[in-house]
Amino acid sequence: MKRIIAGMLLMLWLAGCASTPADTINASGISIDHTVIPASAEVGVAVAAYAGFENSDGDDRLLGVECVCATSIELHRVVSDGDKVSMTNSFPLTLPAKGRVEVRPPGTPLHFMLIGTKRAFAVGERVPMRLRFERAGSVEAVFTVVGKSQDGWDAWTPD
Ligand SMILES: [Cu+2]
């Protein structure tokens, strides 16, 4: 009986490993994937960023994102009012228990907006950011710079 349990635990552990690659950031039940930023040659501009959140634990909220690469980062919700389109800062991002939330290209209704970028982003570069969760705490996630957001999202693989 003991051996069967040990075997089952090993299988669970292996399964856990297989679904948790090195680059999928895992913090108290939240794994972060599809972390992409489109390339930008300019500095001092606004650049979008994207990520997916898999919450295998209880309700949580993403309170904010910080990066030395930008003056500030907002969660933008795109709101259209007639022919006027505006973006409002919409932190916190609700992450329901046992749920998946995607902030994904093309960026509507949601995208992360890096405001006042302090560096250029070249394809293939890796950009660390700090994500603050209400329950899971503060977590570093590495974003990958891609040519086009949508293509980068579709082709994203953990490494
Ligand atoms: Cu925006």
Image: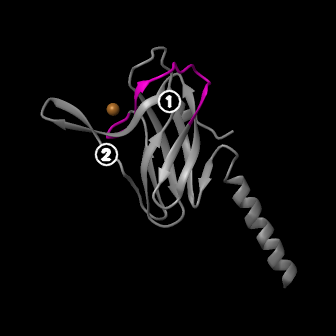
Comparing labels 2 and 1, the label whose residue is closer to the camera: 2
Judge whether residue 112 is colored magenta. Answer: yes
* Residue 107 location (% of width, % of height): 37, 35
| Residue at position x 53%, y 56% in the image | 137
Image-quadrant location for residue 76: top left
Looking at the rendered structure, the kind of residue marked 1 is Ile
Residue 27 falls in image quadrant: bottom right
Check if residue 114 falls in the magenta segment: yes
**Residue segment shown in magenta:** 107-128
Q: Nearer the viewer, residue 43 or 143?
A: 43
Residue position marked by numbered label 1 in the rendering: 37
Residue carrying label 2: 90
Residue drawn where x is 57% and y is 61% of the image: 29
State ligand 1's quadrant: top left
Which element type, helix, strand or loop, lies under badge 2?
A: loop
Q: Secondary structure at mark 1?
A: strand
